[in-house]
Amino acid sequence: MSDSPSNRPAAHKSAMRWVPLAIVAALGVLLFAGVLLSRNPNREALPSPLIGKPAPAFRLPVLHEAGRLVTDKDLRGAPYLLNVWGSWCPACRDEHPVLTRFAETKRVRVIGFNWKDEHADALRWLEQFGNPYLMVLTDYDGKAAIDWGIYGAPETFLVDERGIIRWKYVGPLTDEVIENELLPELARIDARGASL
């Protein structure tokens, strides 16, 4: 008798009472997942398809040496940190003291990659804030940056002694990023080099 047509609407009403609760519970689960994901400080970084692959070939002028061109092959033999910056970039100014302190440790060669900048503006910026770079490569038209997958500044790449990209960071370097990400990756490079 419980399956009679007169009891069906009551059963349907009873089931419909739970639908709003199920929707609220589902939204709660999504909110909780979002909170968990937001704890990752690098959550906006896009993974680079270049990690573990050879650095793109380039031939770029050196900012402070008119007429001198440097290629990717010229930088092989020892690891280097390639830091993308521009005088027009406010976040680069925030990053600069951190990068300068790190460069002073001489832990690895720090190479500047001046991107889409005017020559005089780049020189003036380095004169004003200091030059932490062993050398500064210039990509005036931004064509070399395309091959590196650069889409903003600052960005930083760690390249090993064989010219393989081992690490990339998008955004301004901080002391925490250097300590927790960059230095461990440098240690792995050192360990790989020692085992060869």
Image (cartoon, rainbow, N blue to C red):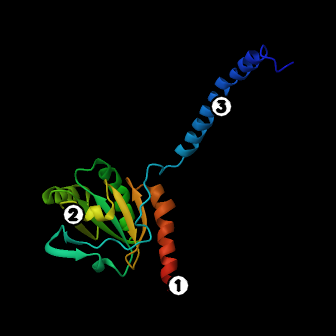
Instruction: Give the CA separation, mark 3 to mark 2.
Output: 52 Å
Q: Residue at x 51, y 67 (%)?
A: 184
Instruction: Give the CA separation, mark 1 to mark 3.
Output: 53 Å
**Pick the front one: 111 or 31:** 31
Point out the frontmost of discs 3 and 2.
Answer: 3
Residue tagged 3 = 25
- Circle 3: residue type: Ala
Residue 69, picture quadrant: bottom left
Query: How many numbered discs?
Result: 3
* Classed neighbour count for the residue bearing mark 2: other residues with Cα under 10 Å, few (<14), some (14–19), many (≥20): many
Q: Please, is residue 16 above or below residue 181 in the view?
A: above
Q: Earlier in the sequence, mark 2 or mark 1?
A: 2
- Circle 2: residue type: Asp
Q: Earlier in the sequence, mark 3 or mark 2?
A: 3
- Circle 1: residue type: Ser
Residue tagged 1 = 195
Residue tagged 2 = 139
Report whether 30 appears left or right of 8. left
Q: Residue at x 35, y 58 (%)?
A: 155
**Pick the front one: 119 or 7:** 7
Q: Does the residue at mark 2 contact the one at mark 1 (Cβ under 8 Å)?
A: no
How far across and down, in percent of the image, does residue 13 sit? 71, 17
Instruction: Give the CA separation, mark 2 to mark 1.
Output: 35 Å
Residue 82, picture quadrant: bottom left
Task: Tell me the element at label 3.
Answer: helix
